């Protein structure tokens, strides 16, 4: 790989090819440190951020248990104890998949997770939810018991009223089984994969910017020029800050580095505005630790 | 398992709660309540912290 001949060949021969272009675009969109990050912003340290990963974990259990059911067949999952157990694992992992996914949806809804160019992330999440409902529905139709017969006969009129019954017959067991074990899981897996890639591309949505009063309560103040300082602004009282904060959020431009003394500016300033390492923190937490939500990784992460 | 089966009668007719035009099974209502509790707990409960790395 260190041979100059190989490097020349790589640049000249692959540049005009579609594979080379796809590789370039892919690597630009998903550099390795963004595709598989080993650290997350400070605000991700909350239980509300774990439900997406829990949903994926439950989905993997659904897939694995479904694969075992497919290997052994209906007589096994209806009659044998182990088959019934795996059948129940398949059902309960689906229940947990939906529970985690709905809590994930609620949490992301209340934090307006479509902010900061994350509309596609939100849309793929909605798609994953909708297709998952269809997958679970065809699963209920594939149980081969009175329950599935009841659901199928009750659902047919509703499906027929939409017109979809012309080619999608809920009373056709073979068709519903194939949709359940092949087509729909494939779509769900692809959509979830896209969703995760978009989360990697755009980053995890940050919380809303704090108000001045919230900052003041943590000992961080906003000066007249819009910069952050850890010394109270003499001309503005706490009461005025509180009143102001309820009406006026923190300015939306990227936050300036804290106005505390530190080493001279250098190339390090290309990084997020972190406090200098040599800064001696005030009593208790440092200015940086008290404002973790302000340290956006990228400008587009700002709400 | 038998204790759980004794607590929750799984073989009988499902219980439904009606409120006007709204009708929901007790099982579904419990699950929705559990999800709400899960979300509130996730917001309130502190997340375990460890030493953060700084560049």
Image: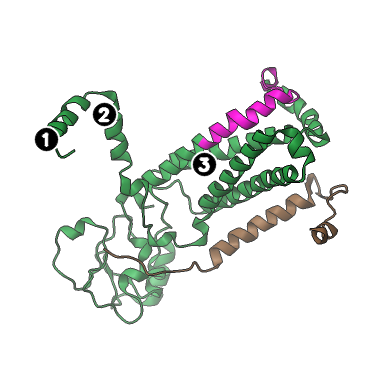
Badge 3 marks a residue whose secondary structure is helix
Q: Based on the displayed image, in which of its 4 quarters is residue A17 positioned?
A: top left
Chain ID for label 1?
A
Evaluate whether residue A248 shows in this view.
no
Image point 29% across, 80% down: which residue? A282
Q: Which chain is green?
A: A
Which labelled disc corresponds to residue A20?
Answer: 2
Foreground residue, A263 or A11?
A: A11
> What is the display colour for chain B?
brown
Total residue callouts: 3
Q: Label 1: which residue?
A: A4
Image point 56% across, 44% down: which residue? A60
Judge the density around disc 1: few (<14), some (14-19), many (≥20) Cα neighbours within 10 Å. few
Badge 1 marks a residue whose secondary structure is helix
Q: Main secondary structure of the magenta part?
A: helix
Q: Is residue A260 left or right of residue A116?
A: left
Residues drawn in magenta:
A164-189
Q: Label 3: which residue?
A: A125
Judge the density around disc 3: few (<14), some (14-19), many (≥20) Cα neighbours within 10 Å. many
Chain ID for label 3?
A
Q: Is residue A272 left or right of residue B41?
A: left
Q: Nearer the viewer, mark 2 or mark 1?
A: 1
Residue A208 lies, in percent from the top left, at 42, 57
């Amino acid at each position: 790989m260190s041979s100059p001949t190989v490097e020349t060949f790589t640049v000249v021969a692959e540049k005009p090819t579609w594979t080379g272009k796809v590789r370039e675009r892919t690597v630009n969109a998903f550099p390795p440190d963004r595709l598989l990050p080993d650290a997350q912003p400070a605000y991700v340290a909350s239980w509300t951020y774990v439900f997406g990963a829990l949903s994926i974990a439950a989905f993997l259990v659904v897939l694995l248990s479904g694969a075992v059911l497919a290997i052994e067949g209906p007589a096994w999952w209806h009659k044998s104890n182990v088959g019934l157990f795996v059948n129940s694992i398949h059902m309960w992992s689906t229940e947990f998949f939906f529970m985690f996914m709905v809590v994930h949806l609620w949490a992301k809804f209340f934090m307006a997770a479509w902010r900061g160019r994350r509309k596609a992330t939100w849309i793929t999440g909605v798609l994953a939810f909708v297709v998952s409902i269809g997958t679970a529905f065809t699963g209920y139709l594939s149980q081969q018991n009175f329950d599935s017969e009841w659901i199928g006969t009750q659902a047919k009129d509703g499906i027929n009223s939409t017109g979809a019954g012309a080619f999608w017959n809920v009373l056709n067991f073979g068709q519903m089984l194939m949709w359940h074990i092949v087509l729909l899981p494939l779509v769900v897996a692809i959509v979830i994969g896209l969703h995760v890639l978009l989360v990697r591309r755009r980053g995890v949505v940050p919380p809303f910017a704090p108000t001045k009063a919230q900052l003041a309560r943590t000992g961080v103040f906003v000066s007249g020029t819009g910069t952050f300082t850890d010394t109270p602004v003499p001309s503005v009282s706490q009461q005025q800050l509180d009143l102001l904060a309820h009406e006026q959020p923190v300015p939306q431009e990227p936050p300036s580095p804290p106005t505390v003394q530190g080493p001279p500016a250098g190339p390090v300033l290309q990084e997020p505005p972190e406090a200098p390492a040599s800064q001696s923190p005030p009593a208790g937490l440092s200015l940086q630790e008290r404002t973790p939500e302000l340290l956006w990784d990228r400008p587009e992460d700002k709400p | 398992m038998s204790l759980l089966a004794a607590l929750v009668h799984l073989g009988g007719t499902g219980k439904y709660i009606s409120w006007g035009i709204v009708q929901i099974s007790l099982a579904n209502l419990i699950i929705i309540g559990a999800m709400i509790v899960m979300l509130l707990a996730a917001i309130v409960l502190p997340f375990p912290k460890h030493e953060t790395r700084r560049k």
